[in-house]
């Protein structure tokens, strides 16, 4: 598996954020390992609280759409910290270590946290919207299976258990979990399953450039208007001669109109133009004298 993954890593590395988050007694702790440590500590605390009959205290951390809609927003952040010990929890942690770490190597720490943050918060946000009609609840959602789906999307032809390709194993597991949810009428689990795995699949496809988001031009600005300087009158002799010829042609046309139809046929604008031409001629004559 490591050889096949290494061949494709260079295609998707987007930054140099591949260093550890922290160090523990000289050992590097990467983002995937850090999340595993957080969830293991949460499992130990959950176990201790349950052992001392403190289960009511844990009810303040689990997700409930009714309570969130009444202002207890912290449940959106704390629901995943209630993790009783179970084989499924252990399996999720191994998925973090195996597949989460490979995703972090490929995408870098920032994108890995962004991927897992979407997986973690998608379920409570979606349940809050559905909670407007139907009460929803959730607790203990590490999201390891969704990370496996992201890995299988990124490296579909990597051989995993018993030589089964990642893409086929992902398809089989999603199908089995879906049938289990349908058989036991676990609609909340079914919604969470399809929402998180769908997000993981779409996230990887988006990073690969195979999915593009539509652009909303609601706030698109119009083109900037440029203020042009005032046009200066042309002062070249050729330009003056051209304007003078044009004016004389207009005056000749007005004189022809007077000859044919009389001076009363001129409009007020035409009379003003004729008077202006007459004034210009008088100025030129006086200047010559």
Image (cartoon, grey):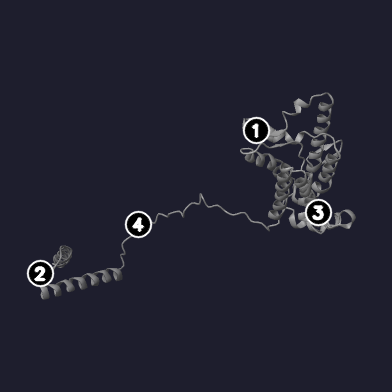
> Is residue 250 at all visible to an observer of this figure?
yes
Name the spot of residue 92 as percent of width and height, x first.
82, 43
Q: Secondary structure at mark 4?
A: loop
Q: Secondary structure at mark 3?
A: helix
State the separation of the CA atoms marked 3 and 1: 35 Å
Circle 3 packing at 10 Å, graded few (<14), some (14-19), many (20+), is few
Q: Secondary structure at mark 2?
A: helix
Instruction: Kindly identify the residue that appears in the image at 75 percent across and 47 percent down.
Output: 182
| Earlier-in-chain disc, 1 versus 2 | 1
Q: Which residue is mark 4?
A: 230
| Earlier-in-chain disc, 3 versus 4 | 3
Name the spot of residue 244 as percent of width and height, x first.
23, 70
| Earlier-in-chain disc, 3 versus 1 | 1
Dot in front, 3 or 2? 3
| Earlier-in-chain disc, 4 versus 1 | 1
* Residue 263: assigned label: 2
Instruction: Kindly identify the residue that appears in the image at 68 percent across and 39 percent down.
Output: 124
Q: Which residue is mark 1?
A: 66
State the separation of the CA atoms marked 1 and 2: 92 Å
Q: Secondary structure at mark 1?
A: helix
Dot in front, 4 or 1? 1
Instruction: Kindly identify the residue that appears in the image at 69 percent across and 41 percent down.
Output: 123
Q: Which residue is mark 3?
A: 172
* Residue 254: assigned label: none
State yes or no: discs 1 and 2 in contact (Cβ < 8 Å): no
State the separation of the CA atoms marked 2 and 4: 38 Å
Front position in the image: 56 or 147: 56
> As drawn, is 125 to the left or to the right of 87?
left
Name the spot of residue 207 as percent of width and height, x first.
70, 54
> Is residue 147 at all visible to an observer of this figure?
no
**In the figure, 254 relative to 228: above or below?**
below
Name the spot of residue 77 as percent of width and height, x first.
70, 35
């Amino acid at each position: 598996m490591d050889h096949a993954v290494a061949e494709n890593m260079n295609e998707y590395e987007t930054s140099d954020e591949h260093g550890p988050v922290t160090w523990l007694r000289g050992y590097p702790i990467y983002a995937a390992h850090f999340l595993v440590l957080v969830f293991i500590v949460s499992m130990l605390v959950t176990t201790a609280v349950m052992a001392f009959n403190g289960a009511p205290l844990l009810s303040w951390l689990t997700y409930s759409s009714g309570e969130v809609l009444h202002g207890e927003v912290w449940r959106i952040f704390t629901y995943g910290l209630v993790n009783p010990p179970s084989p499924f929890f252990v399996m999720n942690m191994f998925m973090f270590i195996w597949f989460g770490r490979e995703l972090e190597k490929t995408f870098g720490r920032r994108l890995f946290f962004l991927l897992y943050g979407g997986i973690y918060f998608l379920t409570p946000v979606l349940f809050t919207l559905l909670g407007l009609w139907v009460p929803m609840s959730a607790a203990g959602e590490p999201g390891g299976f969704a990370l496996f789906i992201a890995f299988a999307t990124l490296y579909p032809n990597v051989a995993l258990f018993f030589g089964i390709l990642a893409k086929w194993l992902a398809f089989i597991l999603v199908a089995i979990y879906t049938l289990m949810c349908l058989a036991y009428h676990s609609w909340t689990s079914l919604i969470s399953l399809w929402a998180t795995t769908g997000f993981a699949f779409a996230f990887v496809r988006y990073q690969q450039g195979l999915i593009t988001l539509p652009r909303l031009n609601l706030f698109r600005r119009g083109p900037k208007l440029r203020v042009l300087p005032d046009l200066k009158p042309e002062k070249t002799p050729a330009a003056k001669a051209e304007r003078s010829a044009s004016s004389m042609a207009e005056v000749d046309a007005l004189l022809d109109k007077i000859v044919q139809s009389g001076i009363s046929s001129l409009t007020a604008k035409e009379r003003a133009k004729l008077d202006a031409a007459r004034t210009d001629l008088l100025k030129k004559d006086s200047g010559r004298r």
